[in-house]
Amino acid sequence: MSAPDISRSPRAEAWIRFKRDRIAVFFLVVFAAYALSALGAQVIELYQGSPFMYEQSLADLGVDLEETALPPSSESWMAWFGTTSAGKSVLIRVFHGTKVAFVVGLCGAGLSVVIGMTLGLIAGYANQWVDELVVYIYSTVASIPYLLLMLALAFIVRQGPIADTYRSFLFSDYVSLGLFNIVVVIGLTSWVTLCRLVRAEVKKVRELEYIHAARALGFGDVRIVFQHILPNVFHLVIINFSLTFVRAIKSEVILTFLGVGVDKEPSWGQMIADAKSELMQGIWWPLLASGLALFGLTLAVNYVGDALRDALDPRLK
Amino acid sequence: MIAFLLRRILYTIPVLLGVAAITLLLFDVAGGDPVAMKLGKNPDPAEVEALRAALGLDASLPVQYLNFLGQVVTLNFGTSWIDDTPVREIFLRGLMPTLSLSLPAFSIGAVLSISLSLVVAFYRGSILDRAVTALAIAGISVSSLIYILVGQWLLADQWKLFPIWGYEYGPSAVFFVALPVLIWVMLSVGTDVRYFRTVVLEEIGRDYVRTARAKGLSDTRVLFGHVLRNSAIPIITRLTIIVPFLITGSFLLEIFFGIPGLGSTLFTAITSSDLPVVKAFTMLGATLYVIFNIVADLLYAWFDPRIRLS
């Protein structure tokens, strides 16, 4: 009896390969810490209500410190990263920015991945007519310069006849239009790569014998696509999600900086935008804090994404 | 091969028609009434009617679409709404400043990242390889805004190595584009090294490399004579696809450093709802993208005899 005594699912195998990379595990923990902060910021915000702590200066919060633009100091935990030129705590604002980054990252990447995956599955599996239509759509969308489309959309949805309809999708006044915008724009412009990859992979997988077998057993198309094909292309979705996540939080920073992004609450992009004039007055700590926060999250997701790609790619076994 | 190319070229027609439709819908329909945008609030009704007719907006949507296609085909996009300069002139004016920034940045970046990735892949697993790979992933994780703000503040404002802002035509442009070029290179090298390293690594693992080494060829000959030649296809393809972006320019760098190129022109046009300019640039960007994708396919075929001869 020499049957292998351990048999693991491909997913367990991938997890074992992933764990071998200690740095990747470290960055996964870093990512989890960011996610917890984001969740924490959201909970505090709901619990506390207006006026939010991030809007108040340290003096309002009862901390008596002399300067408004205070460099990092240990006098109060709120001043660990210093205060802005308006006397607000950099630490609290950066903390809240984590929440904005996660909303943008998760929703933007989520929307993009859902569109890309669905269209990719349909194009790869359906008949030639549908396939060509999807290919045509993504060829067209891909031809329009990404940043131009993003900026143009961001400016246009603020005015014009569709602005009101568009705003009605925004079920709450609380979310800033800019934030919603970024999510929509990222979602509508970033799905092409994944769609292409999934389509190509589905075309390969659907010719495999187990799919023929499933069809011979009389399974419906929906069941075959979701239960038999999707698991085999899902690694593409996961990897692409991490890439789009990074792209989304970076786009938030750029769009906010250019004045069409998040405007109702502090985000890293807004802090970096404010830092432009502050920096010239020698106030460097808000930029350092928001820049580092952004850097840490981006690096963690980039590294984990790379490690996931290596771990999930069956060819690298 | 020729049939394939012909199909590729013909396919660009429906794609560009689609782009034109999206452009028109996006800017003229979803973007609100262009006339209201041009005349501001509470305009004179007679004036509105006149302008509507002049801009061809009284026609039905399909007719507007045909008119727009006519503009695209004749490359005559009319004049800017802001100062009535012909769009073509605006484009030509911005082209030089943009190229004076993008071409040096592209060439320096390409040479740097190709040579770095060759060396790093050749000494795979060494400290050098790990250091460069780590630096590359750290480098791409820093926001481009941080590079720009810190570069501008530290190198230009504090250390006075470069001018902070502005542009001059002619040879003195070198001083003004130096810092943005440096930042562009920093921004692109990280991504490119990571990509090229994978490409080169794939080649280095092949049998012919072992044969060449076994023959006693020097490392440099193996690298540049054999590996580089075989990795050339994906590298060239990638570089070709970047070319359209060299022409449309960099929004952020041009805005920050006051370079009057196409990127900053387009940004101003978007913020001031100068629709003829925005529409022209969208079509230009898309056309360039489509053309250079075909060029990339062509080069791909040309460099690979297996494809060329099939």
Image: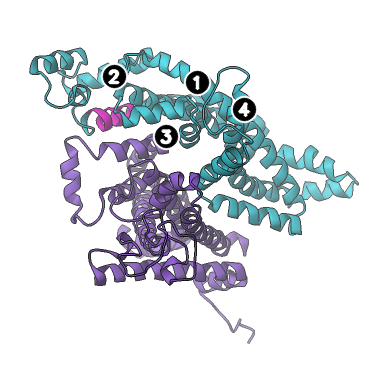
Secondary structure type for disc 1: helix
Of all residues shown, which one is farthest toward the front? A66
Q: Earlier in the sequence, mark 2 or mark 4?
A: 2
Instruction: Give left or right: position of B96 versus B224.
Output: left
Q: Amino acid at mark 4?
A: Phe
Q: Is residue A113 magenta?
A: no
Asked if labels 4 and 2 touch by Cβ distance under 8 angstroms, the answer is: no
Q: Which residue is mark 4?
A: B175
- Bin the neighbour count of mark 4 within 10 Å (Cα to Cα): few under 14, some 14-19, many 20 and up: some
Instruction: Give left or right: position of B182 versus B122.
Output: left
Q: Amino acid at mark 3?
A: Pro
Instruction: Give left or right: position of B15 versus A6.
Output: left
Q: Is residue B21 magenta?
A: yes
Q: Which residue is mark 1?
A: B95
Secondary structure type for disc 4: helix
Asked if labels 2 and 1 touch by Cβ distance under 8 angstroms, the answer is: no
Rounded to the nearest whole Å, what is the CA distance between mark 3 and mark 4?
A: 29 Å
Q: Which residue is mark 2?
A: B81
Q: Nearer the viewer, mark 2 or mark 3?
A: 2
Task: Identify the main secondary structure in magenta.
Answer: helix
